[in-house]
Image: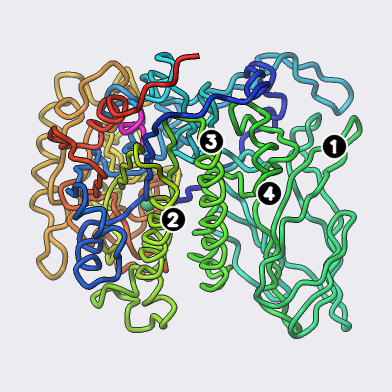
Amino acid sequence: MAISLRPQRWLWLCLLLALLPLGCGQQPEPKAAARLIVLGFDGLDPKLVERWMADGSLPEFDRLRREGHYQTLATSNPPQSPVAWASFATGEGAGAHGIFDFLRRNPETYAPEFSIAQFTPPAHSLSFGNWDLPLGDGRLVNRRQGEPFWLRATAQGQRATVQRVPVTYPPDLVQRMLAGMGVPDLRGSQGTYTLYATRAMAAAESGGRVVNVAMSNQGRIETLFEGPQHPLKPMQALSLPLIVDARADSAAVTLGDETRELKLGVWSDWWPLRFPFTLGSIPGMVRLRLVEGYPRPLLYVSPVHADPTDVVVPLTSPPQYAAELAERIGRFHTLGMPEETWSLNQGHLDEQGFIDMVRTTLAEGEAMLFDAMDRHDSELVIHVFVQPDRISHMFWRGLDAQHPLHAESNDTARGAIGWIYREADRVLGAVRARMGPDDRLVVLSDHGFASFRRAVHVNRWLVERGYLVLTEGAKESEPLFAQVDWSRSRAYALGLNGIFINQAGRERSGIVTADERAALLQEIIKGLADWRDADGSVIVQQSFLASAIYPGAHAEDAPDLVLGYAPGYRASWQTTLGGAPRLMVEDNRQPWSGDHCIDPAAVPGVLFTSFEPGQSLDNIAAMADFLLKHTPAAPAH
Ligand SMILES: [Zn+2]
């Protein structure tokens, strides 16, 4: 899923490509005698898989089940992709790998930060006129702790190709790795799109920006496209001229040095860009889509992706793998979470545009996976397809007759999830067709899915109970706890599943002492358990104390309480960012209509193996040792 935070600084441009070793592929690698192929399908749900295996819609999954092994696979707590994939990689729970949510909170500021990768700019810079020259390179780290099993395989001499696994940015030093969720766009954000509108449109709440532009009588728009921040003037963006001549069903678009014809409702191919500045230029690439034509054109420009043919972020290991892959399969989306969920959610991209975009990322994923398989020189090949998760988030309303948006869902929305499951089945068949007799296959998902019918404003509940106190006169709070009086607040909610205690000595304005803490947590747990929706439904099915579920040395970012919502409920978007609107619970009337950030018992994932596993695999964290054990030895050379 895509959560966008304020863009970080530009400084990762100066990053440590130089620290990643060169030196792979000078001479042909010996062939792998046998391989373990691991296919991840993010969000594949056992209820749907079982239903559609039974009715014949998923023949390849059904064949794998009959010839090998099938089971449900318990997910992480909370059941969020970065948490679960970090457990998959390291074999550890969140208390050991340190990833508890897409977001972590900074106890100094109470502000949410992206929890997966962290860039620390160089400590010193030199001001020169209105330039700001960094001294040093800064530091980029994957916040995931622990050792992923592909590094353990590498240490044993086995070769691993790892593609698009979430929480792998910057990439690990294995034979080949293409980073997944965590890779930023060139603004340093998790994906910022731009919509050019010729009629008044509200600003994007998240993930993008709406630029209202004037149009001449002839349908011409002349404006600027803003790209990455100026490397030497951190407050300024680099930009390129954008000229659009709009017609009813097409537009001539000039962006940078290039002019192309765009057809209404058809994505452009990759559009390479160079953003010039005094000392050089920054390469990137975008895709464009004319969402509506003249007389009221809407032009959509994707986030600026790092161009794999000329990378400015540490996208792959070794660094040249990005360009090598682009040479073999063409340019591909490089942003960690490229599926444009926010633009569809905010009505800035049409449903077909979203589905076409997912179709493209799926085709890219297949091409890079098949390339890895056809090279036949890795004992371990891992690829994660996130497309089932993204389609399920955006189109669950089409499947769930009780969703508030179901009645108004069209055939596209109703058919989308069935389509992506059949696509997963097709990819599975193509992978099996490429396997040799000694190769083994493991297919898994990180969690299942449920409907997201009602949005839960947990901070409002905390306000009503007196745990979170608003400033004098405030009736509600904007995100980032804008109207919160910390000197009187004892607890706050942030992220998709967490409640934090405003703890003395930990939070900047913490007031809850160590003696009061346990009783306060018990009181909140009881209150949440008794909480009922207007129709009497349970809202929070289970609450978990961090102290009970997170053994390990890296629990400092953990929420004090993890909420396991009942299926149908989920934290509201406002809650995730520290907002407290007036209602406690309300209907979710946005396209983002399916979710899994609930009670983990309700959303297990799936596991298929082409062989008898010979042991019980009761949790996604059990996969790391199991997969390492089944990775074949490399040939002696
Ligand atoms: Zn998801």
Which of discs 4 and 3 lies nearer the camera? The answer is 4
Left or right for 338, reference 129: left
List the residue tagged with mark 2. Answer: 430
Give the CA distance from mark 1 to mark 3. 24 Å
Rounded to the nearest angstrom, the CA distance separating label 4 from label 2 is 22 Å
Q: Give the percent coordinates (x, y) of residue 168.
A: 48, 32
Numbered tag placed on residue 281 in the rendering? 1
Amino acid type of the residue that numbered disc 3 sits on in the rendered structure: Ala
Say which amino acid is labelled 4: Arg
Contact between marks 2 and 3 (CB within 8 A): the answer is no
Tell me what residue is drawn at x 31 percent, y 44 percent. Answer: 446
Cβ–Cβ under 8 Å for marks 4 and 2: no
Single out the mark in the foreground, 4 or 2: 2
Q: Is residue 30 above or below residue 480?
A: above
Hey, what amino acid is under mark 2? Ala
Residue on which the image places disc 4 = 331
- Return the disc, 2 or 1, that comes first in the chain's sequence: 1
Callout 3: SS: loop
Instruction: Look at label 1 and name its amino acid.
Output: Ser
Quadrant in the picture for residue 436: top left
**Circle nearer the N terminus (2, 3):** 3
Q: In the image, is the residue at mark 3 within 8 Å of ligand 1 by its beta carbon? A: no
Q: Earlier in the sequence, mark 1 or mark 4?
A: 1
SS state under label 2 = helix
- Residue designated by label 3: 179
Marks 1 and 4: which is nearer the front? 4
Which residue corresponds to the image point at 83% horizontal and 59% vertical from the top-left? 255
- In front of the other: label 2 or label 1? 2
